[in-house]
Amino acid sequence: MDVLTAAWVGAGSPTPHAATLTGECSHCGAQDHLVSVRSVVSKQFTGFDGWANPSGRGVCLGCAWAYSTAELRAGAHLITRDPAALAPLDRAGVAARLRSGPIGAGEALVVPMRPGRKHLLPTAVWGRISIEDIDLVWGRQEMCLLGMVDQLRALGFGSRMLTAPAPPFQVMKTLTPPQFRQALQAWGQLEPWRQTGNPWMALAVHVTTPTTTKESRR
Ligand SMILES: [Zn+2]
């Protein structure tokens, strides 16, 4: 079972569209009742890479749900294979999941860091975190480095500072000697994540960004 199908089954196999055709699903290739492609993706949609048959007329009910459900693009979701399940996660929920253990072969995590922009679920793969344009592994090493980000956050370093080449003095000058050493050590350990555009760092910064007062009041 692929990630999309597990998510659809986990969501209760919703069918927001009427199937008006039969044939081969343009996206996954399954022989099924189909919903017209036009009714599930916009005219501007260009993400046909990897579709089984991009020029086909219809998609199956599961694929139609995955492409047309706005919530799937708006927020993070954890999908599990056995049993098939789909769970929405807020940013703090994603951070908690990433701290708790590696992403195993029976799980997939989808994290739209720019909500609403791209369809991530339809191309998500087991054992990976899908962010825009890339699927990331998440093992012990990544957990450890996320722990370093957490430590630096706790010492007062903000999102922009975390990707700076050296720990900014404005925070360093406020630290006690043991904290100072801790910050330097964490900074050094995060070196592999600190190249421009490193996707793990982008994810770690995103999920550990403190929720604003405004958001927490909702
Ligand atoms: Zn399909």
Image (cartoon, rainbow, N blue to C red):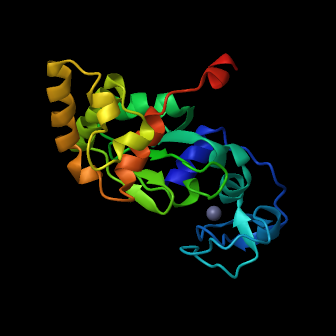
Q: Nearer the viewer, residue 35 or 31?
A: 35
- The image quadrant where one finds the C terminus is top right
Q: Position of residue 175 (x, y in %)?
A: 25, 21
Depicted 169 relative to depicted 107: above or below = above
- Does residue 205 lie above or below 62 as drawn? above
> Is residue 149 visible to the viewer in this orientation of the structure?
no
Could you tell me which residue is drawn at 56 percent across and 52 percent down? Answer: 5
Q: Does the rendering let one see residue 92?
A: yes
Nearer-the-camera pick, 214 or 158: 158
Residue 10 placement: quadrant: top right
Q: Residue at x 58, y 73 (%)?
A: 51
Find residue 25 and report its horizontal and vertical position in percent. Answer: 66, 69
Relative to 214, 182 lies left or right:
left
User: Which residue is at a point 14% across and 28% down the rendered structure image?
Assistant: 181
Question: Exactly how many numbered labels are in the figure?
Answer: 0
In the displayed structure, 71 sits above or below 199; it is above
Q: Position of residue 109 (x, y in %)?
A: 46, 44
Task: Report x, y in % for residue 24.
Answer: 66, 73
Q: Nearer the viewer, residue 209 or 8?
A: 209
Query: As drawn, is 109 to the left or to the right of 36?
Result: left
- Where ligand 1 lies, by quadrant? bottom right
